[in-house]
Amino acid sequence: MKIYAGFLRWAARGRSFEAEAAKLADSTAALIRETEPDFLRLADDLKALYAGAAELGRTTAAQASSMRTTLGECNLTGPMGVASVLLDKLHGGLAETGRELNSLVEVCSAIRQLLHLGRQIRPIAVFLRTAGYSFRVESARLEATRQTFGAFSEELGTLAGRIGELGDEIESRAESAHTELAHLVQAITADLNQLREIAGRTGPIVRDTCEDTQQMLDSSLSALEQSEARTVAISRHAGEAIYHMQFGDIVRQKLEHIGASLTESAASPDRADQILAVQHAQIEMVMGEIRSVRDGLSQAFAGLKIEGGHLAETVHYLQSGAAGPSSLSSPFENLKKHLLHLEEVTSRGAGLREQSQRSWRRAMEASGEVCRSMDQVREINFRMHLQSLNAIIKTEWLGEEGRTLRVLSTHMHTMFRESNALVADTAAVLAAIGRLADNGISGEDGAASLKSRLAGDLDAVDRAQQELQRTIDAAAALSRRQADRLEQAHKSLEFLAVASTRLETLSLGIAGLRKEIFPLKTRHAGAAVFDSGAAIELYTMASERDVHHRLLNQKPEFAQTVPAGAGAEASSEDDNIEFF
Amino acid sequence: MSKSILTVDDSASMREMISFTLRNAGYHVIEAVDGVDAMAKLAQTPVHMLITDLNMPRLDGLGLIRQARALPSCKFIPIVMLTTESQDEKKQAGRAAGASGWIVKPFRGEQLVAVARKFLN
């Protein structure tokens, strides 16, 4: 009766309840229609933000991992670092060449001995020639002597000539080899000293550059790892934003329901008060939810902005090469320049070693030639030995007549022993040269492996530089894109404020309508002043209040993994998941 | 080859969120706007999993589950309800219709992916 009276009072004022209710329903429909593109745009922005965060996370994690690997391969400092190994090997190679040089000096001295030994053969030849002459003179004086020593004196002359030639030959070859070797040794010594000086000078520079570069790489890696942590946080905030966006969709659905109910109320005046009360409470809930969505999204965006700002700082740090004294490429370029210089030194060291090997081969050739000459001297010696013994016996037969020749023959035998000793000395010198040369030629050539290690290290340094540059470029581009998207998404949140204001108007409209038509019911619902808490409690379902409560009061823990869900486990412990 | 999931929701933004989350996790996602559209898509392409909203125009989630379960290709696939409804009676109705699980909106991305993994891996 009272409701009917309310309608009558209202109608008397020339207003139609149906028209007012339909107007409210239209307003709700218009709000849904107008905010739909905004919701979709916001969803797109969030999707882009989340995708960007995931991509940023993946890229940064991959680059950090790749950088770690590269850094592992490109160990610049420490006992096994490029600087130490290269310099140790270089110094080792130079020391080895130095030892070979000392051996070559010893060989030079041995060859000089050969020269002296060759010269000592000359007196033997002179004696043999003199002895031959004496035998010929004696033979001319005595018939018996001529018969016995005629041929002998001729042979002595021949032997004297041959041994003299051999002595000259040995002397000449030894002298030529000695001169050549002495020059080589002198050249190698000069080069070696120069290389030692360069290595000594370059060493500390290379070590310092390696330290600088390693420090820069380490701090770049550390910055990358920080970025990795940032991207995880960014991903978490993006997940949070997407979560709140779902509430936006729930709100949209509720508005659809409110619109439909308001239309229904226009067609059912007898249930209108109840419907309006319920929708009024629903609108109050929705307004609270929109506020919460807006707050949640704003909070997520603020988090994204802070993390994005930190990330941009890190990228800027990497870009400006703050880890190094100058631009990013400088430490790498310096290192490469010094390593290449070191490679040149190494190549020159290898050249020295080749030169030294050639010297060894030359010494071997010279000693081989002397050896062959000495073999012939040995044969002549043997012949001298036989002839001197023969002469001693035959001069015995001549008695007093052969006394002079006997002295000569005995002296010739003594000469044989001296010559034999000379041959033995030469053989010993040649053997010593052979031993030294064997060691010199078979010595390990570290230059090739050193160059190969150097090439590998230069490649690793190149790769590290490229990796870092790629990471910086990718992170810079992504972080710029993310900042733009974030700004766009943040701006688009304004539509939620507009929606809130319009809902407030709608709420006031419903309240006014109810107050005018159903004053008693309104009082019953709460008070003269609308109490949203009481109305919500009275006119909404428990499940709706549950969603409302979750939205307003619960803040879930968001995954810190990229992409979302990796490694996560679904269980019935999640209060919003149930498995049948 | 990635497993395919049909996601059914009348809200375009919600469909986008679900598809985006599942695609990010490596699944092939097919979208349908309601139960009728979903049935048409199921007739064309068999899927490994179905995720559906409850309240939709033309054919709602429960009706969709009943009709889908009648198809031989969908008899044993996991079907998960993804809805704002959390009343026990609605859940029981879903269970009776043939749903394998129930997720109340809003969900966290990793929750949805974890549910998909639980059923598909």
Image: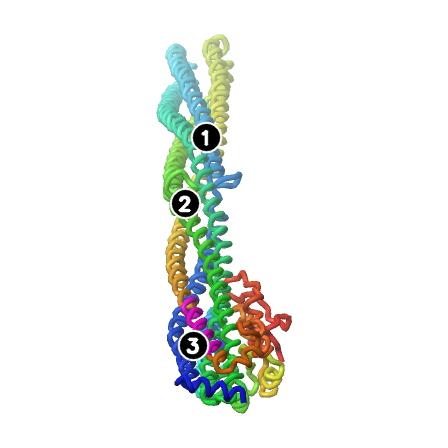
What is the distance, in whole Å, between disc 3 and disc 2 at their CAs? Answer: 54 Å
**Which chain is disc 3 placed on?**
B
Neighbor class of circle 3 (other Cα within 10 Å; few <14, some 14-19, many 20+) is some
Q: Nearer the viewer, residue A436 or A12?
A: A12
Q: Amino acid at mark 3?
A: Ala
Asked if marks 3 and 2 fall on the same chain, the answer is no
Q: Indicate which disc residue A458 carries.
A: 2
Helix, strand or loop at label 3? It is helix
Q: Are marks 3 and 1 in contact (CB under 8 Å)?
A: no
* Residue found 60% across the figure and 82% down from its top: B91
Q: Quadrant of the N terminus of chain A?
A: bottom right
The relative height of residue A129 versus residue B117 in the rendered view (above or below) is above
Number of disc labels: 3
Q: Position of residue A473 (x, y in %)?
A: 38, 53
Residue placed under numbered mark 3 in the picture: B12
Q: Are marks 2 and 1 in contact (CB under 8 Å)?
A: no
Q: Amino acid at mark 1?
A: Glu
- Dominant SS of magenta comes to helix
Q: Indicate which disc residue A100 carries.
A: 1
**Which chain is disc 2 placed on?**
A
Neighbor class of circle 2 (other Cα within 10 Å; few <14, some 14-19, many 20+) is some
Q: Position of residue A474 (x, y in %)?
A: 39, 56
Q: Which residues are magenta?
A: A497-512
Quick check: is A49 in the magenta stretch? no
Q: Nearer the viewer, residue A139 or A35?
A: A35
What is the distance, in whole Å, between disc 2 and disc 1 at their CAs? Answer: 30 Å
Figure quadrant of residue A556: bottom right
Quick check: is A507 in the magenta stretch? yes
Q: Amino acid at mark 2?
A: Leu
Q: Quadrant of the C terminus of chain A?
A: bottom right
* Residue found 46% across the figure and 85% down from its top: A9
